[in-house]
Structures are given as structure tokens and as C-alpha cells.
Amino acid sequence: MNRNIVIGNAWPYANSSLHLGHIAGLISGDILARYYRLTGDNVMFVSGSDCHGTPITERARKEKTSPQKIAEHYDEEFKELFKKINFSYDLYSHTYSEYHKEKVKELFKKLYDNGYIYEKIEPQCFCEKCNKFLADREIILKCPECGEETKGDQCDNCLHVPTQEELIGGNCIVCGSNTIQKDNKILYLKLSDFQKEIEEHTKKVNHEWRINAKNETEKYLKQGLLDRAVTRDIDWGVEIPIPGYEDKRMYVWIDAVLGYLTDTMKVCEEKGLNWEDFWKEGHNNKIYMCHGKDNIVFHSIILNALLLGQKDNYHLVDTIVSTEYLNYNDQKFSKSKKIGITALEALDIYPIDSLRFHLVNNGPEKKDTNFTPEDFTATHNSELLNKFGNLVNRTLKFKGLEKIKLGTINPEMKELIENTYTEVGNLIEKLEFREATNKIMNLVEAANKYYDSQEPWKQVKENEEEFINTIFTCTNIIANLSNLFEPIMPETTSKIRNYLDLKNPTWEPIYIEKEINVASKDIQALFERIK
């Protein structure tokens, strides 16, 4: 029975350009989506631009434009980026779409009707000079956990999320004035009500989570889940569907994480599918969330709480795919300090599939890693061009070769092909993407050693039958590499399928069944050397 699989990539915030570190954290989603499609499962791969909230309104104020203009600009930039790097989204949307907002309001109202959202009158930070209640991101304070200066939404240094009480005594980020406390009417989510269910669920599913996801989630559960404010005093965001709160908006952490659900609903409406097959229990389903380590608790705790609060048989998130940080030349990416390049700039400089491969094979899967142009060039030239590209080139463009004739495949190579599918598939499902690429490259290296040991340049003169078998064996390996590398390098594998007249890729061994006229093909090198 085919599985119904949701893969959610974190919604990038539409306030600045994305850099390579963001792509390193999101490419996991595309690998999973492409892999599960190859296995025949039903995949829903979704994301979108997170377009609401204080940073965008602040930027709009400074640039004397509207928040929507800011959001639209970066939303278009993100769409261009993800199209160029070949992320295979079923839908990439944005949070200011009317469809998304209406669906989120329905889900919010259900939480309220079920008793999980309640009203509270409490003092809140207020700036008398600006004459406004301040959102958490509009407050500067010293982090109560590590002592570093931070904004009030989350500490960049230790990832602590300050409570409302901890925000007292902060300063207004706009004018610098000390804040005062003033009573405000706020709606809260009863996050504490979900402590036991989320604890039990986490213990059941976290066996294959990376250590950062386990540790961060367990830290919050151990200290006890705290109720969390869900309304804010701002005019750019999703409206509150509760009487008396017309002048307030939802916090973006509700708005954005529910986007995985609203995107699925939208795709299913357009394709005539049932969205509940992906999000309700009993449909052989699995849910992955892919993001950087700073987004863990929003997906392992917050999203699950919002789903539990619907009281409607929702399937909870199974797998957190959380990366560490990617640095550039041993420094954090920083646009203001001109450290690193944007992802779009990188795609203009580097071959796309080589960049995808490098970000997986040298990415921050389990620890912070470093990107340098020199390391990338070494990956491209030494691994991809010299090994993979060379195998394809010297097999399919063997001097004087007109046709790949049917022969007998080497039994050891055939066994290695079949074992590689099993091993790589297991590694991908265990989130071991780096090791998966290494396993595929092991097959490439084995093929090159086999080619060298057979010496086809001698066989073509001395033993035609053995020459045919050697070329046939290597061509079959190349055909299967077009399947195995599909989740990593889709443009490259598409070229191979075109050269070999192969149909759509699949996650099972394939073997050449008819002669291939390679002389009639315009076979180009898969990779060009970077100087």
C-alpha cells in the first residue's frame, strides 16, 4: 500500500534574501520528496513565504513603503530561487493569500471553540513615545538564559524564547526608550494542556531525529510547556476571528506552521484529492518537517499542539529533519558585513547540480560546517567530473562506438547495483543524506575500477564479445545512477535518461533491453572543469 507523505520545508521569512545556509537546511525536503516519489508513494511537498509580522512592518516603515510590497518582493525572489535550484514543490505559496488566511482563521476558531484559546488581561510592554504596545521582536533585552543582548522573540545565541515576564524592563527597538507596563487584552494558547500528549508522541517517534532536535524538544518538555500569547497589536497579519479582537493579528508562528496544512488543502482542491488522506490518522501517512535548528520547537511542539487542539483525529509530525548551521569561510553569513553570497548569486556562479551535491555531501547535517569556493571546486572537479562525469564520458563516447549493444552484465556489478538501492534508500529514510551520496559514489568508483580492469581499449581490438559486455555493464550502471542520483542532481540525471532513451526514473534496478544508437546522440560532458 502506497504511503501518503507530507514533507514541509520551513517557510522562509520574506524580509531579506536567502543565503546558502538556508538552502543547506531546506534541500533535505527536496531529497525526501524526490525519493518518495521514486518509490511510488503519494507525496505532498509544500512550503511558502512567511510574510507577516513586525520585521516586515519595520522594514516597510524605514523604506516608506507597505508591508505587502516588501513581502511580495522577497516572495518573488524566493520563488525564482527555488525554481532555479529545482526544488520540486507541489505548492510554494505565501501567507498573505486569501485562501491561506481564511483557512487559518477557521483552524484558529476551532481552537477557541474547543477551549484551547482563552482571554487574559495582563500588563504588556508599552512604549509611551511611540504610543504602542510592543511585539516581542520590537524589544531589546539581555537574555535571561545566557546574558547576551537579544530581541524579545528568540535569543540568537542560545535559542531561548523569553516569556512575557522576562520581557519586562526591555527597551523599544525603534526609539530606544525604556518600556512601561500597561494592561492589554490578549488571547493565549493553552500550550500547557498538551504537555502529556506531546511528551508521549515525542518518545514514540524521535528515534531517528537528529540529536539537536531531540535535545531542544526535550529541553522544553522538561521545563514544562507554558501557555503562549497568540494575539499581537499590529495591523499586518491574519485577522483574529473572535469578537472584540478585530484590531489585533495572529502571531506568525501560528500563521506560518499551519501553512503546511493550508497548502495541502489547496493542492488537493485543485487536483481533486482528499487532504485528510495526508493529515488524518488511518491513511498510512507520515509527516516530515525540514528546517534549520532554530526552528525545531515550532515544528516538534507548536505545530503538534495546534493539530491536537483541533480534536479531529490529526496525524502528528513524525520526523524532524533539523540541520546545523552552514558558515562561509569560517564566518556566519552576514549581508550587512558582506560575508558570503546570496543563494541566487551562488546559482549564477556555480553549476546547480554540483552545488546541490556539495551542500548535501559537505553540508551541516549533524554539525556546523563551512562553505568555501575552494572546497566546492574540489568537490566539483575531483568527485563529480573526474569520477562520475568521466565514467559516463568514456563509456558512452568510447572512440568509434556507434551503438551500445546488448551483452551480459557482470554479475558482481549487478549485485552491487541492487544492493546500492537498498542501502541508499535506508540511509535516506534514516536522514543520512551525506552517507547516501557516499554510497552512490562508491558505485561510481566501483564502476570506474571495473572499467579499468577490463581494459576495453584492448578488448575492442582483441575480444569483441568481452568489449560489448564491458560497455553494456557500465552503461547499465550509468542507467541506474540516473535513478540513484535523481534526488540529489535532477538536471544531470535527466541528461543521462535522454542519452539512454530511459523513461521516468524509479527506485528499483533497471536494465538496458535494446540497443542504443549513441552515435546519433549529442552526448555532452556532464560537468565542465572549474578553474
Image (cartoon, rainbow, N blue to C red):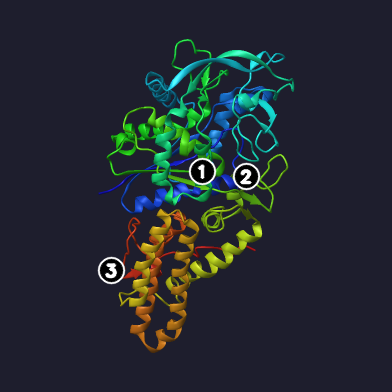
Specify which label sits upstream in the sequence, 2 or 1. Answer: 1
Position in image of residue 135 (x %, y %): 61, 23
Which numbered marker is on residue 503?
A: none
Label 2 neighbour load within 10 Å: few <14, some 14-19, many 20+ = some
Nearer the observer: mark 1 or 3; the answer is 1
The residue under the point 61% across, 59% down is: 376
Circle 1: residue type = His
Q: Which residue is mark 3?
A: 513
Q: Is residue 79 visible?
A: no
Q: Position of residue 301 (x, y in %)?
A: 47, 36
* Sequence-first disc among 1 and 3: 1
| Residue closest to the eye, 433 or 390 | 433
Asked which secondary structure carries label 3, the reply is loop
Marks 2 and 1, how far apart at CA: 18 Å
State left or right for residue 356 relative to residue 317.
right
Circle 3: residue type:
Glu
The kind of secondary structure element at disc 2 is loop
Seen as rendered, the residue at the extreme left is 1
